[in-house]
Image (spheres, helix red, strand yellow):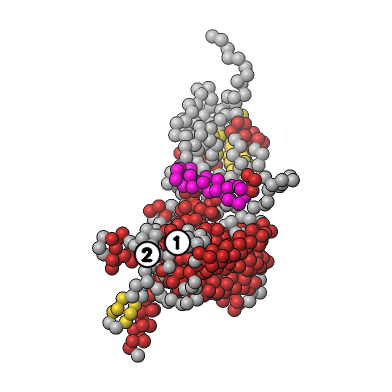
């Protein structure tokens, strides 16, 4: 509604626009056209859900091999990689086999997780995965402190098709299969 | 004595009917506003309660009814309780003088009943203006009694805004009064019969188009609607004068705001757009040979015009941002007031020479 800045003489067109509320009419035409060509962009969320992208990073989970043994070797690299200190691993020897280790306890404090996926990248045995679950609203924050059994359960329901255990690997542990990637394979 | 009792019963029925219609309209408006606003902004509006969200007003009403009724510490309890009532009653009471349909009289059992006119006061429009001013008290007192800085600021803004814009409402109406020569809304509406060229917005000696524009803008300001919603500016003052209100009292303020919108639209319709008169001479139903049912068409026209104004309110809200306070004041005093005054002079001269 400010009067147009006049330099000496009155700008007739500006003045006409002001007194006829021209700019307001342009705006009102826009809103009316949106009303007449009504195409809502709303997604009625609980009733209809958007298709997630392929690389969606949702809830974290611990994975198993196809024979049901855990992949995790208790190396603590995920704990080291995590920027928010979500993960706590208690590593232990496999009973009776002093060279093999596994994670005796595994905790995730999902209230702090920012879903960056660094733990998944860090894992040398692909024991961690990001699922497509995202509806994890709870009434009690403590329900987001997950232990090993819960994380394995999430993995079981999100990854029904499991990776096959390599024949060389011991049933309770695994070689660091990623670490040797840079060494060329022996030719036959 | 029995006649008096019958008259009282008839009047009470009329009052109940009109109040009921207004409240239903307000319920409808709360939904319509959210829907229209949503559609204009590529959203859907309420969709959850009932099919396409049509039961949302009832859900809101029930929610507000069962909410806790809080009185803030340090608030003036008496005024805090009074303010919503003081805002709501003037908003509803103004409908008494609105002519909803043709000025016909039915003789039933010795009683002459005018079903579409509750009361024909010879100063009807002054009555509405007076009560609209009292409604401002509700807002100001509500803001003051809440013992909250946001409420107080909202109330003060409302006071200044209502005072400056009520002047424009009054002055823009004067042109119509000059042509009509009456303050009674019934007489003013009757005088506009016989086609849209007789409506005072377009009528011969002095078309009141400028007055209509001034009236509509001032009415938006007076009802505290966007773009003049400074008293309840939610981005600055939380909710302005009803920040501290909850439950039924909040509902009363809400109801008062929407009832005021309806009232202002009704007055605009009655004064400038011919009230219940169709934009052509007579009524279609009358031409079809059923003149006793012409009131259906007439009341429909009244409703149509009123709802058009209400749609304009929504439309403005969807389009315009809020004005700054100094802009509001400058626009009111330096633009609207001179236009309204000039309109009075021109109308007076036109009526004197051609009327």
- Residues at badges 1 and 2 in contact (C-beta under 8 Å)? no
Q: Residue visible at 36% across and 64% down?
A: B298
Which chain letter matches label 2? Answer: B
**x%, y% of residue A178?**
59, 24
Q: Residue visible at 50% across and 41% down?
A: A133
Please tell me how crowded label 2 is: few (under 14), some (14-19), or many (20+) other residues with Cα within 10 Å.
many
Q: From this view, report whether residue A67 is shown above or below residue B254.
A: above
Can residue A9 be seen by looking at this rendering?
yes
Please identify the quarter of the rendering in which residue B284 is found: bottom left
Q: Residue furthest front?
A: B353
Labels 1 and 2 share a subunit:
yes
Q: Main secondary structure of the magenta part?
A: helix
Question: What whole-number distance in Å separates the C-alpha atoms at marks 1 and 2?
Answer: 16 Å
Instruction: Compare residues B235 and B24 and report the one nearer the observer.
Output: B24
User: At numbered mark 2, what does the secondary structure look like: helix, strand or loop?
Assistant: helix
Q: Residue furthest bottom?
A: B1
Can residue B231 be seen by looking at this rendering?
no
Is A32 within the magenta?
Answer: yes
The residues colored magenta run A16-43
Q: From this view, report whether residue A105 is shown above or below residue B78.
A: above
Please tell me how crowded label 1 is: few (under 14), some (14-19), or many (20+) other residues with Cα within 10 Å.
many
**x%, y% of residue A119?**
61, 35
Q: Which residue is label 2 attached to?
A: B299
Which marked residue is nearer to the observer: mark 1 or mark 2? 1
**Residue A138 left/right relative to B160:** left
Instruction: Compare residues B60 and A169 and report the one nearer the observer.
Output: B60
**Quadrant that contains the N terminus of chain B:** bottom left
Q: From this view, report whether residue B250 is shown above or below residue A147.
A: below
Q: Tag count in the figure? A: 2
Q: Residue visible at 62% across and 73% down?
A: B141
């Amino acid at each position: 509604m400010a009067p147009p800045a006049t330099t000496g003489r009155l700008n007739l067109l500006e003045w006409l626009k002001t007194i006829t509320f021209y700019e307001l009419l342009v705006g009102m035409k826009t809103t009316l056209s949106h009303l007449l060509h009504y195409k809502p962009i709303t997604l009625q969320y609980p009733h209809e859900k958007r298709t997630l992208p392929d690389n969606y990073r949702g809830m974290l989970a611990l994975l198993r091999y196809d024979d049901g043994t855990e992949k995790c070797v208790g190396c603590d690299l995920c704990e080291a990689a995590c920027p928010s200190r979500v993960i706590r691993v208690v590593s232990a020897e496999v009973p009776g086999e002093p060279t093999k280790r596994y994670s005796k306890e595994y905790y995730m404090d999902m209230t702090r997780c920012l879903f960056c996926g660094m733990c998944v990248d860090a894992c040398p045995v692909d024991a961690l995965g990001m699922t497509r679950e995202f509806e994890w609203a709870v009434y009690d924050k403590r329900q987001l402190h997950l232990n090993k059994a819960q994380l394995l359960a999430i993995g079981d329901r999100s990854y029904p098709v499991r990776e096959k255990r390599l024949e060389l690997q011991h049933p309770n542990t695994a070689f660091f299969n990623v670490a040797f990637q840079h060494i060329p394979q022996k030719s036959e | 004595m029995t006649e008096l009792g019958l008259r009282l019963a008839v009047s009470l029925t009329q009052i109940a009917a009109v109040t009921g219609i207004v409240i239903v309209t307000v319920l409808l408006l709360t939904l319509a506003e959210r829907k229209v606003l949503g559609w204009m902004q590529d959203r859907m509006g309420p969709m959850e309660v009932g099919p396409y969200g049509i039961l949302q007003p009832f859900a809101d009403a029930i929610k507000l009814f069962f909410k806790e009724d809080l009185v803030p510490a340090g608030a003036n309890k008496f005024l805090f309780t009074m303010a919503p009532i003081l805002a709501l009653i003037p908003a509803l009471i103004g409908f008494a003088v609105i002519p909803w349909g043709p000025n016909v009289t039915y003789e039933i059992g010795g009683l002459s009943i005018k079903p579409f006119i509750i009361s024909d006061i010879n100063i009807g429009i002054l009555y509405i203006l007076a009560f609209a001013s009292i409604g401002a008290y509700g807002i100001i007192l509500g803001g003051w009694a809440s013992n909250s800085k946001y409420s107080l600021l909202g109330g003060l803004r409302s006071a200044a805004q209502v005072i400056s814009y009520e002047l424009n409402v009054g002055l823009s109406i004067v042109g119509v009064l000059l042509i009509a020569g009456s303050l009674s809304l019934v007489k003013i509406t009757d005088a506009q019969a016989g086609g849209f060229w007789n409506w005072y917005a377009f009528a011969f000696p002095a078309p009141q188009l400028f007055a209509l524009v001034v009236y509509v803008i001032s009415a938006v300001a007076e009802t505290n609607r966007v773009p003049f919603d400074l008293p309840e500016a939610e981005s600055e003052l939380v909710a302005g004068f009803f920040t501290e209100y909850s439950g039924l009292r909040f509902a009363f303020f809400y109801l008062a705001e929407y009832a005021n919108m309806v009232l202002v639209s009704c007055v605009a319709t009655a004064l400038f757009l011919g009230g219940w008169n169709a934009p052509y001479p007579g009524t279609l139903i009358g031409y079809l040979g059923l003149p006793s049912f012409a009131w259906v068409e007439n009341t429909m026209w009244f409703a149509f015009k009123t709802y058009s104004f209400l749609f304009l309110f929504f439309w403005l809200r969807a389009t315009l941002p809020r004005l700054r306070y100094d802009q509001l004041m400058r626009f009111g005093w330096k633009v609207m007031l001179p236009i309204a005054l000039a309109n009075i002079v021109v109308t007076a001269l036109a009526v004197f020479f051609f009327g």
